[in-house]
């Protein structure tokens, strides 16, 4: 993120905090796709991802002063809010996704294979699902993921290693495509 982006975000938050609806609309335009993608990776459910995205920005309406630019980027902060809301939703719903036992390893994955992988990721415990979404699907660095998930870099690495092992076991392969060892 550039210095310009940081200044722009602070200005938009300030404007929004002062009641400028256009400031909020611009923040939504800039960050809603990032939040939605993360929520989709974690839930494997477009409707749930859209709901969480909306909840994040409703939360921001009520807490515009909670962002501290010294602690990181606004996009990561909003993904962190999404993460906490997802944890709360899962805790409230106690919804578990049943995992498939095997997946053939085709040359190219078709839509049903992609859906299976998404369901399998969604079936992981939250601590593993979050690191897979951040590192493997959103391509965040370990450091960015650690800031976003509010944990140590070593924790991100160990959770990601364990998550990949669980995915490989559930998908019936030694390695999941796109996940380096």
Image: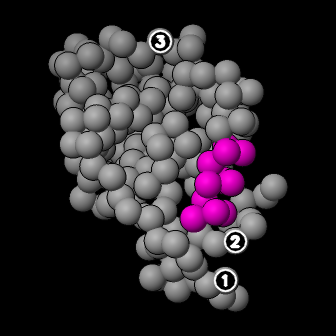
> Where in the figure is residue 119, as x and y percent of width and height?
43, 64
Q: Is residue 121 above or below residue 5?
A: below
Disc assigned to residue 68: 3
Q: Quadrant of residue 176?
A: bottom right
Q: Which residue is mark 2?
A: 173
Q: Is residue 161 above or below residue 57?
A: below
> Where in the figure is residue 51, as x and y percent of width and height?
23, 48
Name which of mark 2 and mark 1 comes first in the sequence: 1
Q: Is residue 168 magenta?
A: yes
Disc assigned to residue 105: 1
Q: Is the C-beta separation of discs 2 and 1 under 8 Å?
A: yes
Q: Which residues are magenta?
A: 160-170
Neighbours of disc 3 within 10 Å: few (<14), some (14-19), many (20+):
few
Label 3 and label 1: CA atoms lie apart by 45 Å
Question: Residue drawn 33% across and 38% down?
Answer: 86
Q: Is residue 119 above or below residue 34?
A: below
Q: Nearer the viewer, residue 137 or 115?
A: 115
> Where in the figure is residue 147, as x and y percent of width and height?
60, 24
Name which of mark 3 and mark 1 comes first in the sequence: 3
């Amino acid at each position: 993120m550039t210095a310009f982006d940081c200044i722009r975000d602070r200005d938009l938050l300030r404007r929004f905090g002062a009641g400028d609806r256009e400031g909020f609309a611009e923040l939504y335009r800039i960050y809603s796709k990032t939040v939605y993608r993360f929520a989709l990776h974690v839930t494997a459910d477009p409707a749930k991802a859209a709901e969480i995205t909306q909840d994040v920005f409703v939360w921001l309406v009520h807490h515009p002063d909670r962002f501290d630019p010294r602690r990181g980027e606004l996009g990561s902060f909003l993904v962190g809010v999404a993460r906490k809301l997802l944890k709360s939703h899962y805790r409230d719903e106690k919804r578990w996704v049943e995992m498939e036992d095997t997946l053939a390893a085709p040359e190219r994955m078709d839509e049903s294979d992609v859906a299976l992988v998404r369901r399998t990721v969604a079936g992981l415990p939250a601590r593993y699902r979050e690191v897979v979404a951040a590192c493997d699907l959103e391509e965040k660095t370990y450091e960015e993921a650690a800031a976003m998930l509010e944990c140590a870099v070593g924790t991100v690495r160990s959770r990601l290693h364990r998550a990949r092992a669980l995915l490989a076991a559930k998908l019936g392969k030694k390695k999941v495509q796109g996940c380096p060892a």
